[in-house]
Image (cartoon, rainbow, N blue to C red):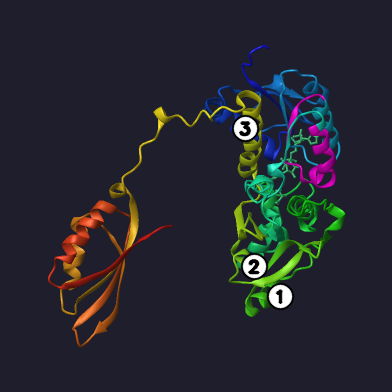
């Protein structure tokens, strides 16, 4: 058998996501080659308008407007479909699989409508069809449903799975921004679908919920099975009343299994403002899953945009590539001769919260501040909390700016030795 010198990629689409993928392929070429033992090589890129000005420059010889050029290229092992829409994307995916190419797609419409048939076709041709990027942008969801949660009976999914509408709702709720300005910004940031009505009316979320519910309940849930209502009838007054009543408005995708039947719906809901899902703002998505063994788990991250989506697509490409070129071998990055140094805790920098009981007399704070200063620790705030008149002590709480652990340990020892310090009651590291 001829020895491979690379894994060939055919890219269908060079828009927001396609450009993101091409950029990652180019910028992370060395990292991927090291992981796989072989480079990934971009062989063809299908577009509609080859002459269009693009921020990302792709070698003109790679661009084509004819899908057949990708299909007939024997050097293309994996086709990445990021064109969007049902047609001709579905047909191109089918043809690629039949020709013996693996396929990675971000296309939720095609997967929601035709996933089971396409997966059967992939199996028939011993090829992989992966679609991690179709739901939740960069958040790993498909793989966890297929693998990590496989031992569970899932009872419910509550999800924010459309970045565009969550971005719009967040801006409207927090800043009183007007609907069309918020939509425009979401489009400029590359979150919205080619037809943003699909986002606004809940269609995009319905496709994604159909994909997740099908995996969760191991039973096909089709897009038309999902009840769907969008966000276009929400007005400023609704946001105001929601806030007054202690609620936040979110477009939720909900699916549950009850007595062997499945409910699936996408619509705006009032959720308590202190719930975790209510805290999910902007383009962030979150999917809460309830399994009988695992309990509740939440997957959270950026749900749209070129980079997060490229992260999911490349994860699929790398998984397929590993199967192509080094099945069964330990991953190349696990090399003990390349281990990175472990930073000793003494060298780690964090902020600190200090609570001390001190003598309630003049000049005490100055003595403590001097010790901190001599150890290069800068104070960010001080509060004197309580006085104990009988014991003539006061409790002070100090927050610091980032400081080295070793410096803080030394300062604490010195402070504890001060006559005026009765007790270092606690010190807690502050993250974030
Ligand atoms: P986009 O910016 O509209 O890009 C689409 C690309 O596909 C363009 O380069 C276009 O060519 C090409 N294309 C479309 N139809 C074609 C055809 N018939 N023949 C040849 N080329 C064609 O779309 P996108 O935002 O990157 O989204 C792509 C896919 O990823 C969609 O399925 C979307 O749902 C999914 N997705 C998007 C995001 C996101 O944040 N944007 C996140 C997750 C998943 P031209 O450039 O020549 O017009
Ligand atoms: N239009 C989609 C969204 C892109 O806003 O979530 C990610 O699938």
Quadrant in the rendering for residue 103: top right
Disc 1 within 8 angstroms of ligand 2 (CB): no
Decide which of tag 2 and tag 3 comes sooner along the chain: 2
Please provide percent x and percent y for residue 195. 80, 48
Q: Determine contact: label 1, label 3, CB under 8 Å.
A: no
Q: Quadrant of the N terminus?
A: top right
Identify the residue under disc 2. Answer: 173
In this rendering, the count of numbered labels is: 3
Q: Secondary structure at mark 3?
A: helix
Region in magenta: 99-123
**SS for dot 1:** helix
Q: Residue furthest top?
A: 2
Q: CA distance from mark 1 to mark 2?
A: 10 Å
Please tell me whether residue 50 belongs to the stretch shown in magenta.
Answer: no
Q: Residue furthest bottom?
A: 390
User: x%, y% of residue 324?
Assistant: 66, 25
Neighbourhood count class around disc 1 (C-alpha, 10 Å): few under 14, some 14–19, many 20 upward: few
Disc 3 within 8 angstroms of ligand 1 (CB): no
Residue at image point 29% right, 67% down? 426
Residue 190: % across, % down: 67, 46
Alpha-carbon span between mark 1 and mark 3 = 48 Å
Which of the two labelled residues, at mark 1 and mark 2, occupies the earlier sequence position? 2
- Disc marking residue 318: 3
Whether tag 1 and tag 2 are in contact, CB under 8 A, the answer is no
Q: Is residue 105 above or below residue 263?
A: above
Q: Position of residue 127 (x, y in %)?
A: 75, 30
Residue assigned mark 1: 237
- The correct choice, above or below, for 202 with respect to 8 in the image is below
Q: Nearer the viewer, mark 2 or mark 3?
A: 3
């Amino acid at each position: 058998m001829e020895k491979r010198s690379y894994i060939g990629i055919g890219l269908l689409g060079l828009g927001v996501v396609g450009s993101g993928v091409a950029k990652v392929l180019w910028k992370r070429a060395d990292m991927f080659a090291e992981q796989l033992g072989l480079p990934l090589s971009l062989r063809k890129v299908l577009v509609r308008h080859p002459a269009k000005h693009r921020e990302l420059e792709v070698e003109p010889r790679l661009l084509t407007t004819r899908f057949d050029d990708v299909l007939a290229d024997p050097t293309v092992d994996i086709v990445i479909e990021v064109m969007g829409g049902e047609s001709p994307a579905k047909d191109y995916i089918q043809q690629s699989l039949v020709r013996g190419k693996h396929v990675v797609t971000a296309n939720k419409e095609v997967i929601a409508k035709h996933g089971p048939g396409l997966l059967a076709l992939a199996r028939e041709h011993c090829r992989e069809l992966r679609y991690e990027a179709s739901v939740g942008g960069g958040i790993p969801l498909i793989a966890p449903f297929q693998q990590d949660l496989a031992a569970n009976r899932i009872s419910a999914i509550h999800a924010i799975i459309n970045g565009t509408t969550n971005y719009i709702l967040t801006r409207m709720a927090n800043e009183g921004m007007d609907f069309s300005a918020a939509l425009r910004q979401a489009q400029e940031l590359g979150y919205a679908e080619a037809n943003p009505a699909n986002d606004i009316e809940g269609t995009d979320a319905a496709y994604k919920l159909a994909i997740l519910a099908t995996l969760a309940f191991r039973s096909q849930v089709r897009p038309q099975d999902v009840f769907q209502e969008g966000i276009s009838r929400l007005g400023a007054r609704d946001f105001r009343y929601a806030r007054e009543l202690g609620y936040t408005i979110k477009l939720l995708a909900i699916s549950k299994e009850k007595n062997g039947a499945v409910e699936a719906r996408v619509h705006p809901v009032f959720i308590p403002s202190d719930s975790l899902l209510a805290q999910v703002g902007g383009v962030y998505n979150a999917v809460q899953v309830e399994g009988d063994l695992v309990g509740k788990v939440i997957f959270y991250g950026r749900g749209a945009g070129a980079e997060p989506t490229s992260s999911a697509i490349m994860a699929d490409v790398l998984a397929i590539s590993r199967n192509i070129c080094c099945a069964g071998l330990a991953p190349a990055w696990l090399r003990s001769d390349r281990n990175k140094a472990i930073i000793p805790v003494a060298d780690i920098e964090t902020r600190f919260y200090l609570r001390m009981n001190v003598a309630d007399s003049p000049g005490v704070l100055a003595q403590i501040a001097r010790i901190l200063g001599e150890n290069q620790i800068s104070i960010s705030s001080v509060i004197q909390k309580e006085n104990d008149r009988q014991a003539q002590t006061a409790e002070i709480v100090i927050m610091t700016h980032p400081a080295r652990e070793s410096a803080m340990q030394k300062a604490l020892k010195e402070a504890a030795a001060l006559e005026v310090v009765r007790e270092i009651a606690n010190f807690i590291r502050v993250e974030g």
